[in-house]
Amino acid sequence: MDWPVALVTELAARRCIIFLGAGASANCISADGKCTPPLWPEFLAQLKDAMPPSADRTTIDILIARERFLDAAEIIITKIAPADFARIVRQAFVNPRYTHSQIHEAVLEIDPKVLVTTNYDDIYDNYCRTGIAHDGYNVCKYYDQHLVNDLRSPVRLVVKAHGCVSDPARIVLTRSHYFKERQIYGSFYQILDALFLTHTVLFVGYSLSDPDIQLILENSNIAAPSSHSHYAFISDDLHPDIEQAAARAYNIRFFKYPRGKHDEAERCLKELSQEVIQYRVYNPGC
């Protein structure tokens, strides 16, 4: 893949934030080799199974089939006990003890100053602590208070925008969760807005369907239009008209790999990491 020199330069200078989506964990394998982390449909199906027999499963199935995941989650979450939710989260994301993916390896080699993710799993969080950054790594959830301090320090930062499996009760899952947390933790989202406004963002393994990130991208592009675009590395199942509309609305350039070919995605990102490393070798002051 022909990665733009501008993107390589931004990554090498650590002026680019990497936004890690669920696709980055799609090739992670459990310790017993039998499963991979669930995506939205599979995770919601697991939660649905914990609902009482009298609950309306038909409507939920329809919403999931239409990819209205937030609405499906809204119904499910009111029908299951918090303890059951925490148990299912652990069963889905913690107990399998997933290994990291080659996408995670490539991202760690790129060594960004800031990585943002809406993923609940802690696969990359754990893996990045084995990284090479001299000043180490820190994980900041949306409800933590140390984001600004970390941004002003040399430490590498993993920002968990929707919470983490380490605290299932604070995972952002439904539409009402989104609005509630934005109200309560407004300063976090203001900082996220500022980061998107002042940095280039590379989306990896992400479908651009998250309402928070859509809003941030829209606001940043309206507030201060820039000739410097963001970038998204996604599968090629995005409709051309939607791609063009998103490119205009969010100021994004898309780079695509064949749908379901995560090995191809891993190869392309490995190439990008090598280009970034090489650029730093020849431009040590970047």
Image: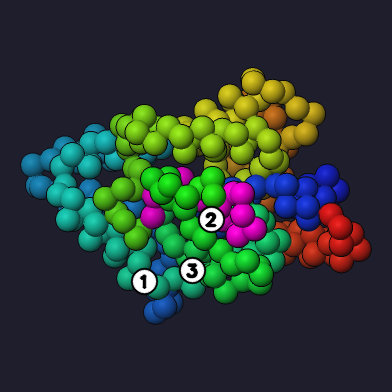
Q: Nearer the viewer, residue 59 or 284?
A: 284
In the rendered structure, which disc, 2 or 3, sits on the residue that comes first in sequence?
3
Residue 41, how many percent across, how many down? 37, 48
Q: Report the side of 190 relative to 259 (left or right).
A: left
Check disc 2: other Cα within 10 Å, few if <14, some if 14-19, many if 20+.
many
Residue at figure coordinates x 82%, y 50% from the top left: 9
Colour pattern of the rendering: rainbow
**Residue ID at (68%, 61%):** 111
Q: Is residue 239 above or below residue 9?
A: above
Locate the N terminus and report the quarter of the image it occupies. Answer: bottom right
Name the element at disc 2.
Answer: strand
Within 10 angstroms of label 1, few (less than 14), some, or many (20 or more) residues?
A: some
The residue to which callout 2 is attached is: 158
Mark on residue 126?
3
What stretch of residues is rendered in magenta?
150-164
- Looking at the picture, tell me which residue is in the foreground, 109 or 250: 109
**Type of amino acid at the residue the image marks with label 2:** Val
- Give the answer, above or below, for where 62 lies relative to 13: above
Q: Nearer the viewer, mark 1 or mark 2?
A: 2
Amino acid residing under circle 1: Pro
| Label 2 close to label 3 by CB (< 8 Å) | no
The x and y percentages for residue 274 are 79, 65
Give residue 96's mark: 1
Residue sticking out furthest to the top: 222
Residue ID at (66%, 42%): 201
Q: Is residue 79 magenta?
A: no
Please report whichever mark, 1 or 2, sits nearer to the chain's N-terminal start.
1
Can residue 104 be seen?
yes
